[in-house]
Amino acid sequence: MKSLQELAAIRDRMKQTVNTREAAHDTTRVVVGMATCGIAAGARPVLNAFTEEIARRELSGVLVTQTGCIGLCQYEPIVEVTTPGQEKVTYVKMTPDKVARVVSEHIIGGKPVAEYTIGAR
Amino acid sequence: MNVLDVAQNSVAAGATLIFITLEANEETGLLTLTIADNGKGMTAETVAHVTDPFYTTRKTRKVGLGLPFLKMSAEMTGGTLGIESEVGKGTTVTASFGLHHIDRAPLGDVASTVGGLIQCSPDIDFVFTVRAGGEEFCADTRELRAVLDGVSFAEPAVAQWVREFIEENTQPILQRSNII
């Protein structure tokens, strides 16, 4: 069972990393399209997978958040990744098993996974 | 369930506290979902329009389907949708569903829905309550926030804990009552 002690431990770990983190403009954002079209296409497992992978790797300065309909419903689930100093990258037709590569190669490695992006379609 | 769409209305209304309650009552045969916020509220005229799919306050497009969908999915199970609102005080949306009606939409992944709301609106407080078969579980972000002491609900590690916390506590209650 999840306990509040566990939450407190997460807090303590986060506080340590937050202190070493630089300003807010250094935050990487993972934005998942979570309108009806996105959810129907399976966006929620994708959002959960990003959250889990980022938590598992104990990355700091990475936020997972949601947005409404991006307007390309046929390409859902769509995930936009914005890293500081780089242009926004739009991943389309995402699945939970594609998430690990995006996290390791793009968010950590700084090199977008070209074959998953909208440009590859 | 399109709770997300509807709860998003509360977020947009500037609410700071949102109560989401899911209650199964075998005696009345109803599953009731209540979303109550302390946002800016609506005038009686607006309330009269919100279940019209061609009414929306947003400017990006001309349809708004959150509440119309909820109304339809409630009514097709013999339930109802009620909206109470007062300008400056907040809005309460209550949807009731026939608990065992064959057309009742499955509840879906409740923990992800509510967990996602908390993760994506980290500055708003949510009180999520599940009541069924004489059991009750309540997750109150005000209590969790006190533990977090400044660490955001948007932190992935925190968000994951919240989702699992809700899942572990609500799944057994819902399962024992044969709701999922």
Image (cartoon, coloured by chain):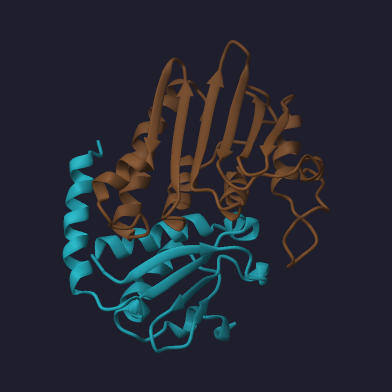
Q: Can you tell which quarter of the image residue A23 is in? A: bottom left
**Residue depicted at 30% across the width and 83% down the height:** A109
Q: Position of residue B47 (x, y in %)?
A: 76, 41
Q: Which chain is cyan?
A: A
**Residue depicted at 76% across the width and 55% down the height:** B56
Q: Position of residue B177 (x, y in %)?
A: 48, 20
Q: Position of residue A40 (x, y in %)?
A: 61, 55
B31 or B117, nearer to the observer: B117
**Residue depicted at 24% across the width and 66% down the height:** A57
A11 or A36, nearer to the observer: A11
Left or right, A7 with reference to B114: left
The quarter in which the N terminus of chain B is drawn is top right
Q: Is residue A31 above or below residue B56?
A: below
Q: Is residue B65 above or below residue A98?
A: above
Q: Which chain is brown?
A: B
Find the residue positioned furthest to the top.
Answer: B27
Q: Is residue A66 above or below residue B147?
A: below
Q: Position of residue B79 (x, y in %)?
A: 72, 26
